[in-house]
Image (cartoon, grey):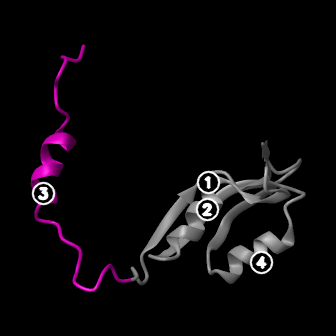
Amino acid sequence: MMKKNMSTPLEVVLPQKAARLQPPRGGLPLMGSNQLLTIGSVAYDSIQTPFGKINKTLGGSASYFSLAALFFTRPSLIAVVGEDFKKADITLFKKQKIDISGLQKAKGKTFHWAGK
């Protein structure tokens, strides 16, 4: 049983070391050959707002995360999509140099989220 108000080692170590960690002058460089593994959802989103509506646009947390990670490194993507996943979306990942060797197509449809 855990005691109340017990600090984890992470809480104890990080504040002490964080004061010594400073980003390099001129900002963070690209990480070169380092890679970041992204595991999550690659989906289609349909969104309706008072300003407009879009149906089945590329969505999913792994998609957004991988595209954002391009500012720092070359991400590798692991996810499962359905047979209906568009070639244009695969091309987008490839064009952005996201490693999609872990993107697997499975029988059925790609996850689809809709919201108003």
Q: Main secondary structure of the magenta part?
A: loop
| Residue 51, numbered circle | none
- The CA distance from mark 2 to mark 4 is 15 Å
Contact, mark 2 vs mark 1 (Cβ under 8 Å): yes
Mark 4 Cα within 10 Å, few/some/many (few <14, many 20+)?
A: few
Q: What segment is highlighted magenta in the picture?
A: 1-29
- Say which residue appears at 77% left-offset and 77% top-offset: 91
Depth-wise, is mark 4 or mark 1 nearer the camera? 1
Judging by the rendered image, the residue that carries numbered circle 1 is 61
What element does badge 1 sit on? Answer: helix
- In the image, taking residue 101 as reference, residue 56 lies left or right, namely right
Judging by the rendered image, the residue that carries numbered circle 4 is 91
- Say which residue appears at 69% left-offset and 83% top-offset: 95
- The CA distance from mark 1 to mark 3 is 30 Å
Residue reaching furthest to the top: 1
Q: Position of residue 94 (x, y in %)?
A: 70, 79
Mark 1 or 3, nearer chain start: 3
Mark 2 or 4, nearer chain start: 2
Mark 2 or 3, nearer chain start: 3
Q: Nearer the viewer, residue 95 or 76?
A: 95
What element does badge 3 sit on? Answer: helix
Q: Position of residue 52 (x, y in %)?
A: 82, 57
Judging by the rendered image, the residue that carries numbered circle 3 is 17
Against 69, is 85 above or below?
Answer: above
What element does badge 2 sit on? Answer: helix
Judging by the rendered image, the residue that carries numbered circle 2 is 64
- The CA distance from mark 2 to mark 1 is 5 Å
Query: Can you tell which quarter of the image residue 26 is in?
Result: bottom left
